[in-house]
């Protein structure tokens, strides 16, 4: 397991098309086309990403040491991820790209087919 940190989250997020960093609620957030898709809380040991509720519940049940839902996000489509529990930067990138795909407008997704889930790196 290769340790990842909030710096890796920032680096990968800002490498994704049209991503901007904006502070909200006193923490870094990352947005594409004005839609937030990553937040990094103050302690920087975890981050939150967009995740459809059904998938989120499955992730939390399958890997509770890695994924959890903050009480104030229970009714939304967000999941928290513990950085120390990730296998490597590739897994981190996959999670961030998946969240980006949920927030990015269709024109941007179409312009970047290499980011589609079926794309082979």
Image: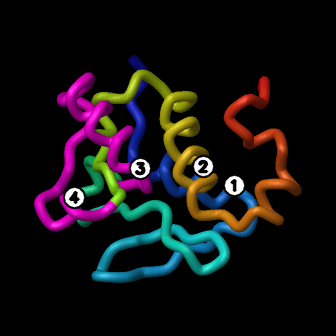
Whole-percent x, y for residue 32 in the image: 63, 70
- Of label 3 and label 4, which has the lower sequence position? 4
Q: CA distance from mark 2 to mark 1?
A: 5 Å
The quadrant of the rendering that contains the N terminus is top left
Question: Which of the 4 quarters of the picture holds residue 23?
Answer: bottom left
Image vertical order of residue 60 relative to residue 103, above or below:
above
Whole-percent x, y for residue 31 in the image: 56, 71
Q: Nearer the viewer, mark 3 or mark 4?
A: 3
Q: Are marks 2 and 1 in contact (CB under 8 Å)?
A: yes
Q: Nearer the viewer, mark 3 or mark 1?
A: 3
Mark 1 surroundings: few (<14), some (14-19) or many (≥20) residues within 10 A: few
Q: Are marks 3 and 4 in contact (CB under 8 Å)?
A: no
Residue at the left extreme, as displayed = 71
Q: Residue at x 52, y 52 (%)?
A: 99
- Of label 2 and label 4, which has the lower sequence position? 2
Q: Which mark is residue 52?
A: 3
Asked whether 26 or 104 is in front, the reply is 104
Which type of secondary structure does the marked residue at label 3 adopt?
A: loop
Q: Are marks 2 and 3 in contact (CB under 8 Å)?
A: no
Residue beneath disc 2? 12
Image vertical order of residue 121 relative to residue 113, above or below:
above
Q: Which mark is residue 97?
A: none
Residue beneath disc 1? 15
Task: Say whether residue 102 is left or right of residue 51.
Answer: right
Q: CA distance from mark 4 to mark 1?
A: 23 Å
Mark 3 surroundings: few (<14), some (14-19) or many (≥20) residues within 10 A: some
- Of label 3 and label 1, which has the lower sequence position? 1
Residue at the right extreme, as displayed = 111
Residue beneath disc 4? 43
Q: Are marks 3 and 1 in contact (CB under 8 Å)?
A: no
Q: CA distance from mark 2 to mark 4?
A: 19 Å
Q: From which residue to which does the magenta span run?
A: 48-76
């Amino acid at each position: 397991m290769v340790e990842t940190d909030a710096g890796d989250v920032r680096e990968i997020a800002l490498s994704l098309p049209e991503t901007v960093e904006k502070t909200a609620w006193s923490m870094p957030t990352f947005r594409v086309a004005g839609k937030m898709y990553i937040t990094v809380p103050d302690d920087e040991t975890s981050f939150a990403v967009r995740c459809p509720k059904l998938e989120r519940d499955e992730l939390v049940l399958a890997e509770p040491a890695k994924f959890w839902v903050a009480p104030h996000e229970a009714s939304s489509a967000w999941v928290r991820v513990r950085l120390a529990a990730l296998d490597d930067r590739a897994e981190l990138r996959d999670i961030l790209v998946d969240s980006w795909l949920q927030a990015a407008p269709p024109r941007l997704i179409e312009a970047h087919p290499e980011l589609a889930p079926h794309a082979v790196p």
